Amino acid sequence: MSVAIWSAKYETGIAEIDAQHKHLFEAINTLAACFRDGTASEGTREALGFLNRYTVDHFYTEEEFMRVVGYPTLAQHQREHTDLLTKVQNLLVKLDEGFLITGDVASFVADWLTHHINEADMDYVRYLKAKVAHLG
């Protein structure tokens, strides 16, 4: 069973961002599957590492879109991104130190991502649409 289920309500209308969000949902589900299938010890580090790398790339892409249009709350958005990255990187450090990571990690990241898309990302989309409408 997936912990992060993609639906149209997460679509921003920006093809590149939506494709990246879908990949993040897949990565979270891969992480959850490691725990569910009993392969957490082998797969958790790899899944978290991928999630970390992909999230860095995705956040850069999102922030670049926001920079280009002069999004006024870019700094706040960046702080949210940094907070999640810090948490994921801390989990990787804990794994290296031998701490056990539980399946709750996948649920936490799924909850964070869906909330972030619905709140912060959609706020940006509303801003972008208003700006385009004003110019048009």
Image (cartoon, rainbow, N blue to C red):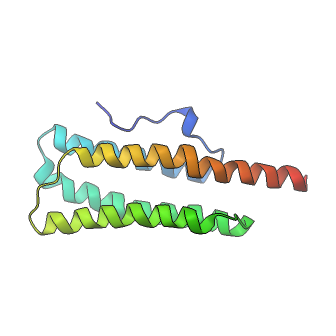
Q: Position of residue 114 (x, y in %)?
A: 46, 43
Most foreground residue, 33 or 125: 125
Residue at the (30%, 67%) spot, across then down: 89
Q: Position of residue 76 (x, y in %)?
A: 56, 64
- On the rendered structure, is 119 left or right of 84? right
Quick check: can you spot residue 27?
Answer: no
Residue at the (19%, 45%) spot, across then down: 34
Quick check: can you spot residue 40?
Answer: yes
Outermost residue toward the top in this view: 1
Residue at the (32%, 59%) spot, across then down: 50
- On the rendered structure, is 129 left or right of 91? right
Most foreground residue, 114 or 14: 114
Outermost residue toward the right in this view: 136
The quarter of the picture where the N terminus appears is top left
Q: Position of residue 20 (x, y in %)?
A: 50, 52
- On the rendered structure, is 76 left or right of 14? left
- On the rendered structure, is 127 left or right of 33? right
Q: Position of residue 64 (x, y in %)?
A: 62, 68
Q: Is residue 115 above or below residue 84?
A: above
Q: In the rendered picture of this protein, how many numbered marks are placed on residues? A: 0
